[in-house]
Amino acid sequence: MKHLKLALCGVMVMMGSSLAQAADLAAGKAVWEKVNCASCHGADAKSPIMPVYPILAGQHADFLAHALKAYQRGAAGAPASANVRKNAVMGAFAAQLSKQDVENVSAWLAAQPGPLAVRK
């Protein structure tokens, strides 16, 4: 049973790394610029114009993707739940993004240096 669990963990790690490689960082930066995220979060994604706006540079890509998808659900009128974020501004921006856009911009933001990045 231990070997099965170990094998499953290995498969999950490989799948996660292949998903991260599927993201196009240049396309992620293009999404960032197209949607004008810098207008609130700062050109470097770590200098928001207001303290209540989050720092995005260095944040985990999976967290960012989940948040964007939650804003999309909120913009689509999904009922309030833990997986729905209702915010008129972010919902309008997120609604414009395709699934690949979400993955790309999330990966690009995670790759940016910032106070949220894990240092090795």
Image (cartoon, rainbow, N blue to C red):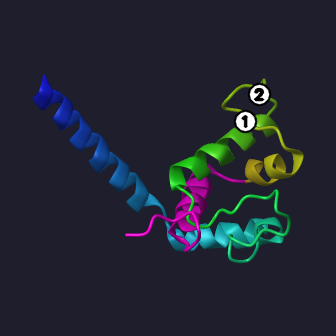
19 left or right, relative to 52: left
Residue 49's spot in the image, x, y percent? 84, 69
65 lies above or below 7: below
Q: Amino acid at mark 1?
A: Arg
**Residue at numbered disc 1:** 73
- Determine the image quadrant of residue 2: top left
Element marked by disc 1: helix
- Determine the image quadrant of residue 4: top left
Numbered mark located on residue 120 in the image: none
Residue 47's spot in the image, x, y percent? 74, 73
90 falls in the magenta region: no
Q: Give the quadrant of the C terminus.
A: bottom left
Q: Contact, CB < 8 Å: mark 1 with mark 2? A: yes
How dense is the environment of label 2, judged by Cα within 10 Å: few (below 14), some, or many (20 and up)? some
**Which residues lie in the magenta part?**
97-120
Element marked by disc 2: loop
How dense is the environment of label 1, judged by Cα within 10 Å: few (below 14), some, or many (20 and up)? many
Q: Residue at x 36, y 49 (%)?
A: 16
- Determine the image quadrant of residue 80: top right
Q: Earlier in the sequence, mark 1 or mark 2?
A: 1
40 left or right, relative to 25: right
**Residue at numbered disc 2:** 78
Residue 81's spot in the image, x, y percent? 72, 25
Residue 91's spot in the image, x, y percent? 80, 46
Q: CA distance from mark 1 to mark 2?
A: 5 Å
Q: Residue at x 46, y 64 (%)?
A: 118
Q: Give the quadrant of the N terminus.
A: top left
